[in-house]
Image (cartoon, grey):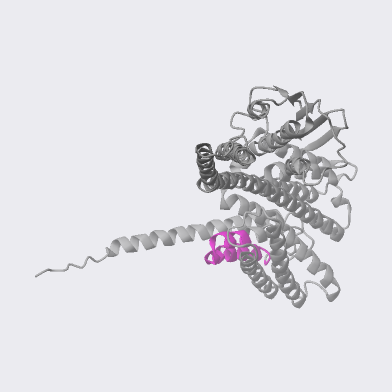
Amino acid sequence: MSTQVEVLPDKTARQSRRLSEGMRYVAGVAALAAAYIAAAKLGQAVRYTGSVAAVWPPVGLGIAALYLYGLRWWPGVFLGDLVVNLELLMGDNALPLGSLIGQQIGNMAEIIGGALLLRRLIGRRAQLDRTEQIVGTLAALALATAISATVGTISMLAGDVISINDVPTFWRTWWLGDLSGGLVVFPLAVVWASNPARAWRRIRTWEAALLFVGVVALAGLAFLASATVTYIVFPALIWAAYRFRAPGSTIATAIVAAVTIGVTADNVGPFSRQEIDTRTLATQLFISVAALTTLMLAAVVSERERSTAALEDATRREGELALEERTRIARDLHDSLSQALFSAVLHTRTAQRALSDGDVDPSGPLAQALAAIGELTRTAQNEMRGLIFDLHRDPIHNGLVAALGDYAREAGQPSGPAIVVDGPTERLPLAHEVETEMFGIGREALANVVKHAGARTASVRVEVREDDVVLEIRDDGRGFDPSHRPPGHYGLESMHGRADEIGAALTVSSAPGAGTVVRVETDRSL
């Protein structure tokens, strides 16, 4: 008889864990509310009216928090926005309670709706390093901020804060203020909060420090100079996007936005000299265009970087697959055609012995034909063995010059032209695939020299220059007219195809009786 004992979870431990989780949640809500209020204080530095800021950073902060960590944190946004709105109930320019309630509802709909739209359009773990993610972010923020602008405008109109004539300008200011704030803060929060270690590794250089100092200096110059030179900061933003991708571009954009807001709030700079509505519009458009341009450029550069890496990986895998295919072909040739040639040699020898034992004249046509068949079969067998050996190994395992030297020694024997190979003994500064294709061109050129040129001497020269590598094969043979290629000879087409494959320049210089020069030039960066 066995006894089962049920072990009940410790009630005190469960309660303690729940209390701890509850305290952490309350602390998180309080921290989010405090961050929201701080962001609102920054946004209130430049106003259009008593309730609309030119740039509203809390939008980006609130949407980023709900996008990254979930909708369960909405109370933090609600409390922060409530504190900001309660402040607007006090003072001489206090707003009606009904208008503030409508504003609060619109702001919550904006932030919750924006987080939901972003999760739908760009996914939950976007790094903002793709152009479609930037477009999706812009679309989601534009729609979400339009909700708040519409609800807020209606609330202010209902509370007699604005007149019907003010509606278009008021709505535009509200919408662009929220949108510009979202375009600056949301990418900054998403890029740095989702993977801070990777973002930090991207900018942890002296160049990045110099960049940010330059952004501050150029932004200050753009808004403190007597002339209108606001565009002068864009080279620094392009620098940030090109060199440091999203982590650097989001910080640079935030710096430019902070300088723009701070300087304009102190009635300094080109925007401060304009009417209030024009000043606000100019500030909003400048920040929005700078943020969107920098983010898009950083995404394009990131996509190019990934495409380059993918191409290099595909090229590497293609080389591996090609090597595997060569091994398979070598194995199949060995198991089929090579064995058949070996059998043909044996049968030819048997026939020759039978003839020698009979009354057939050994110098007659039948004996000569068998001897020729035997010689051709042995030659084909030797060539097949060489081909199988070449397929099994990497032809340039010791470098291009060594490979061409080995081939030249084989091709020139026993009665071929004297071939001299000259070049550096060390490996060339070229990718393996480029070196392989250049060897293929050199091998084809040497084969043409041996088979068709009737040359006495030939030379192979490999030269490594500052920007490129040159391969030249020269012979003193009979030459030919390159513009009239004999039908059925595909050597030149093969060489041109290999050169095109690696982006090299191939020239073939020849004339009847003047020999031939084949020259290949390839960039060292390939």
Q: Residue at x 68, y 46 (%)?
A: 308
Q: Residue at x 57, y 53 (%)?
A: 194
Q: Quadrant of residue 95?
A: bottom right
Residue 491, position as x, y percentages in the image: 75, 41
Residue sitting at the far bottom: 158
Which residues lie in the magenta part?
62-89
Evaluate whether residue 524 shows in this view: no
Residue 423, position as x, y percentages in the image: 70, 22
Q: Horizontal placement of 335 versus 526: left or right?
A: left
Residue sitting at the far left: 1
Residue 362 included in the magenta stretch of the image: no
Image quadrant holding the N terminus, namely: bottom left
Residue sitting at the far front: 359
Q: Residue at x 68, y 65 (%)?
A: 90
Above/below status of 509 relative to 88: above
Residue 85 included in the magenta stretch of the image: yes
Evaluate whether residue 436 shows in this view: yes
Q: Horizontal placement of 223 versus 87: left or right?
A: right
Total labels drawn: 0
Image quadrant holding the C terminus, namely: top right
Q: Horizontal placement of 173 versus 85: left or right?
A: right
Taking depth in this image into account, of 343 and 225 the one nearest to the observer is 343
Q: Main secondary structure of the magenta part?
A: helix
Taking depth in this image into account, of 454 and 275 the one nearest to the observer is 454
Above/below status of 477 relative to 93: above
Residue 363, position as x, y percentages in the image: 62, 34
Above/below status of 372 relative to 11: above
Q: Quadrant of residue 104?
A: bottom right
Q: Quadrant of residue 201?
A: top right
Taking depth in this image into account, of 354 and 472 the one nearest to the observer is 354
Residue 22, position as x, y percentages in the image: 43, 62
